Image (tube, helix red, strand yellow):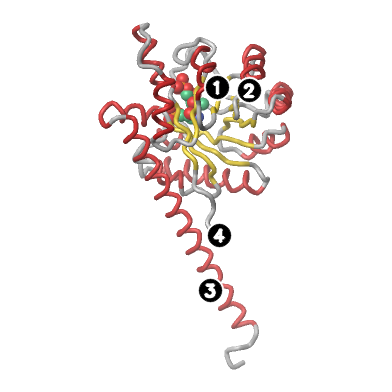
Amino acid sequence: MHPPRILLGVNIDHIATLRQARGTRYPDPVQAALLAEEAGADGITVHLREDRRHIQLRDVRLLAEVLNTRMNLEMAVTDEMLALAEEVRPAHVCLVPEKREELTTEGGLDVVGGFDAIANACQRLAAAGCEVSLFIDPEAAQIDAAQRAGAPVIELHTGAYAEAPPGSEAAMAEYQRLTTAATHAVSLGLVVNAGHGLHYHNVEAIAALPGVNELNIGHAIIARALFVGLKDAVAEMKRLIIAGQEAGLMAALDAHDHAHDHESQHDHVHNGCCGH
Ligand SMILES: CC(=O)[C@@H](O)[C@H](O)COP(=O)(O)O
Ligand SMILES: NCC(=O)COP(=O)(O)O
């Protein structure tokens, strides 16, 4: 049976970045969200940062009213944000680490180190009806802790892979880390999302990872939208994700057939079918 198509969550933070740069009312991230949905986005991701550098509370409240798909609210594990999520009740909440001085999210959430606070946040958000995901680095210890904390979903941070020079040993090592992490998380029954730094040239490989449910992509889509329009930018990303998923499935089938052939040859020899 064909697994479900990988979903695309479009992150619209950078529409708000442009608006905030001039203090105008435009461009409106809410308008962008509706266009992205029309182009095939399966969900809309926003990161309401403590410093409110891009997305504002007004955006989150309006999106909660008008989205036709679902909101994925990225937020830090703070009392203020937990209270807000309990009030707005987005379909999905992704807990992320946050530093004021960072340009963008630098690493994954330390679930091992902050276990009690994160497990408590997972419980509160689940009680509010939100599906919680934890944005983590592709490390077994963090994945295990995420499961123990009660998160049904993880989002693997793809930043290190995206930043490594394409084709380099570092990129291959990061890809292997992501593959191992996704396989491990799926074996624990976790839903596996991924994102950060994905763009039109690296997304196919990430869509080919085993068992991926959703990719969250923002910067590259909004940047391309400047030249081709938001709808085309979203549609093109969806096409690449589907192509990557198909390639991953074919590769998995080939590997399976290969292993099967090898096993049959092995049985053949051991069952004495070679005239011995
Ligand atoms: C959690 C994550 O990887 C991204 O959503 C990122 O945090 C977006 O935030 P910025 O748009 O501020 O980079
Ligand atoms: N969680 C990742 C995300 O929402 C998008 O990150 P980016 O594509 O803007 O780097």
Q: Are marks 2 and 1 in contact (CB under 8 Å)?
A: yes
Classify 10 Å Cα crowding around label 1: few (below 14), some (14-19), many (20 and above): some
Between the residue at mark 4 and the residue at mark 2, the CA separation in whole angstroms equals 34 Å
Q: Which residue was labeled with disc 3? A: 261
Q: Which residue was labeled with disc 4? A: 1
Q: Earlier in the sequence, mark 4 or mark 1?
A: 4
| Residue 105 seen in the current view | no
Q: Is residue 274 left or right of residue 219?
A: right
Q: Earlier in the sequence, mark 2 or mark 1?
A: 1
Which quadrant does the C terminus fall into? bottom right
Q: Which residue was labeled with disc 2? A: 89
Single out the mark in the foreground, 4 or 3.
Answer: 4
Q: Residue at x 64, y 34 (%)?
A: 142
Amino acid tagged 4: Met
Classify 10 Å Cα crowding around label 3: few (below 14), some (14-19), many (20 and above): few
| Looking at the image, residue 163 lies above or below residue 172 | above
180 or 124, which lies in front?
124
Where's residue 5, x and y in %? 49, 48
Q: Earlier in the sequence, mark 3 or mark 2?
A: 2
Q: Are marks 4 and 2 in contact (CB under 8 Å)?
A: no
Q: Which residue was labeled with disc 1? A: 64
